[in-house]
Image: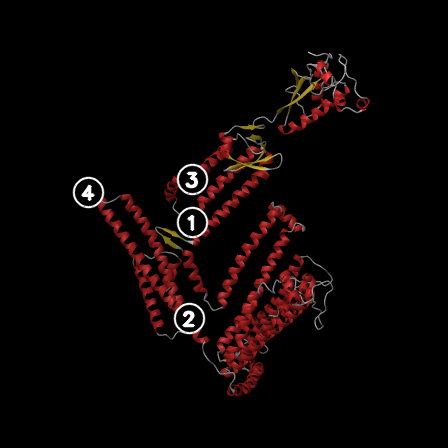
Amino acid sequence: QGTGQAQAQGGGPDGADFKQSLAQWEASLAEIETDIKSNNLEADQIVRLRTRAETARDGARATKTEAEARAAEIKQLLDTLGPKPKEGEPSESEEVAKRRAEIEAQLAEAEGRIKQAELIATRAEGLIAQLAGARRAGIADNLSKIGPPIFSAGTWKKAVPEFGGWLTKIATAPADWWRSGAVGELKGSPRAIMGLLAVLAAVILGILFKRWLLRRFGRDERISEPDFPHRFVAAGVEGFARGMLPVVLVWSSYVVLDALGLLIGSFGEVLQGLAVAVSIYFLITGLTRSALAPRTPDWRIKDFGDRAARLLNRRIAILAGLLAVQTFLVWPGRTLDPSPELFATIGFLFRTAMSVVVLSLLDPRLWYSAHDETAHGVAAEGSRPKPVPGEVPAGAGARKQVEAHKGFHVHRYWWVRALVGAVAIAVPVAGLMGYHELSRFLATRLVLISALIGIYLLIREFVRDMTDVLLDAEKGFGTRTRAALGVGEQGAGMLRFWLILVFDLILFGCAGLLLLLLLGLDWREMSDSFSQAMSGFAIGGQKISPRDILLALGVFIVLFLVVRVFQRFLEKQVWPNTRLDIGVRTAIKAGVGYLGITAAALFAITAAGFDLSNLAIIAGALSVGIGFGLQNIVNNFVSGIILLIGRPIKVGDWVIAGTNEGIVKKINVRSTEIETFQLASVIVPNSELISNSVTNWTHVDSRVRVEVRVGVAYGSDTDMVHELLLRCAAEHEGVLDWPEPFVVFLDFGASSLDFELRCYVGRAFEKVSTASDLRFSINRIFAEEEISIPFPQQDMHIKDLDRLERLLGRPGGSRKAEPDADESERPSAGRKRREGPRAGETDSGGDD
């Protein structure tokens, strides 16, 4: 057994050591098989036999692992020698043949060890499974035992008188201890006196420390509406001071007295039972009081109603008292030897009382929040409920409405209440039927599982509240947290969701494991089952292991976070100290991200145990799909790489791609995001930007030319126009001095002399605003200098004017018809808007 343990820890056996270990394992397993066949195993014996079987199994597994590594090395040597010459081929040299024979013998020996060790491990696994079955069978037999019937008069006739004698034995145990010879030897001993004084001093200091702790860090009734961190710290201090500290003092005193040799005989058992009972009571009541805060509602962690908090605290204290008293009465039974009838009656009475208290705790009104109590009209304890003005009257409808609004405990966990209630009813029923061990098992698990459920729900709700505090933008700490993480409102919501989800999974897993342990499952059996599940399974020649997959996932996440942190370091620390433009920065950052993610994926695949050489087969298979269905995706991917490396466009550029014009916001491996000036996002495939023409206003030089076209009336002074246009350009601060602004006389237009002012601005994004400013300046300065900007003009020539006059009934002639007085007084929009002849008139008044 010792050799097996050494081998399990490291160092493989060789030669005689392996044979000796193998013989020891076989002998140990043979003894275990003999003991199992006896069918007369106690619980502690099963534990010892299981430990021996696990030692043999672990040693065999370690030997197998080392032998497999040795066999792999030997196979590499054989591969170096190459295959044996076939018949008809030249034979190899004598030295090579001799060396090959030696290596093959070593390989055969290593493979033999692998098979023998695997046989031992498999045999040990079978015995461990049989021992686990024997343990479960023993538990089932124990729970199915029928003890003294509770409804039998004989049981009570024997138990009641013995109960008085039992209490007498417990009460006289200190006196018997004091009169014992062992204590007499310690009387007056300096060592005993110093120990007792140390215990007394520890108790006094503990009480003083408790008072100081509560006064300094506990709940202060003078403070109203404390924030969540203060409430949380105060609750922790209350739980420690009222729950943990008394337990520490009790057990430290017990250890000192035991070290002095004072705890002997039945008194030692009684005192030990008293220490356990006191610990149970203080732990339960202290933690309950710290969570519910029945006297200080403003300091309450969860939103319990005042009446609900007081009733819950009181009833849980009663339950803790019953459990503590039962423990104190039953604990000395190992030395005082009570009868089964006495134990059965004591257990039945206390377990029935505890079941009643547990059933009373299932009342939904005990779990109301302050809002629930208000909506139901729950008044102070001991008075009749009063309706609240403006609220829905208490009743089924109101209760349903309140539960839908706030019912944290009332409706969401109804199945927990139903399950706990069923077990609480089963406890006294099993006792009445004589299944006292089953009743004790159910009662113990009922208390422990109820405590587990309560702690689970409180921790779960506490984590939600704490997450809200950490990410609340209205709190100073939450503001600092968001700033440190660089997240906004939406990012904070997503982060809260994932934090709560991960913690819920972890908390649920831990609670599930504790629940299985409380239900009687063995920790080592659970560990073995988990190890077998995590070891995975083989598909073909590849082993799929959840452990390796989780390891690969963890490696990928860690490396991914490292890449993101490095990118953030570049963005916050490096780029501000360089002169690189935003496009180069974005390209480098994206390249680092792609390379980092690729490296993280390769490391993760390696950590998972996959052979990268097998990826060639996968790549060959995927190449067919790429050729048909994925060519567009690959085209865009390659185009994205070209954009990042060649940088024909970059983030921040002003581009025109087809009918889309805007600013490049982001370049991905598949597409590029362009934000138009209407603030719409256009997703353009990268292949279109590579294969089609793209106008980039800011590709190499951010300077751009501004053209402002203007027409002046015929007869205007063109030299003055030239001078005024250049003055407008010179007065604008955004216009560059070089290249110099200049004016172009474009054409003799139909209605005007056409000029164009051409100048340059340093930033392309100022093109539109500069052109607008120049137009304002030109309009103003032309008005000051009385230079007219004409409207389009058109001369109309009418043929056969004489005939038209005759048709209108007017006398012929060449004079023009005078307009009506009304019409002459009517304002003419045309006369106000333009100069020159009106439409429909001729320059000379004649006809063609």
Q: Earlier in the sequence, mark 3 or mark 4?
A: 4
Secondary structure beneath label 1: loop
Dot in front, 3 or 4: 3
Q: Earlier in the sequence, mark 4 or mark 1?
A: 4
Q: Earlier in the sequence, mark 2 or mark 4?
A: 4
The residue that disc 2 covers is 135
Could you tell me how far apart the alpha carbons at marks 2 and 3 are, in whole angstroms?
59 Å
Dot in front, 3 or 1: 3
Q: Amino acid at mark 4?
A: Ser
Tell me, for residue 608, which label it has, or none. Answer: 1
- Give the colour scheme of this rendering: secondary structure
Question: In this view of the protein, can residue 504 be seen by the observer?
Answer: yes
Marks 2,4: beta carbons within 8 A: no
Secondary structure beneath label 4: loop
Could you tell me how far apart the alpha carbons at marks 3 and 1 are, in whole angstroms?
29 Å
In the rendered image, which quarter contains the C terminus? top right
Nearer the observer, 637 or 833 = 833
Could you tell me how far apart the alpha carbons at marks 4 and 1 are, in whole angstroms?
43 Å
Secondary structure beneath label 3: loop
Marks 3,1: beta carbons within 8 A: no
Residue at the spot 75% in from the left edge and 18% down from the top edge: 809
Q: Position of residue 761 (x, y in %)?
A: 64, 25
Residue at the spot 58% in from the left edge and 74% down from the top edge: 277
The residue that disc 3 covers is 629
Q: Residues within 10 Å of mark 1 (few under 14, many from 20)?
A: many
The residue that disc 4 covers is 91
Marks 4,1: beta carbons within 8 A: no
Secondary structure beneath label 2: helix
Q: Residues within 10 Å of mark 4 (few under 14, many from 20)?
A: few
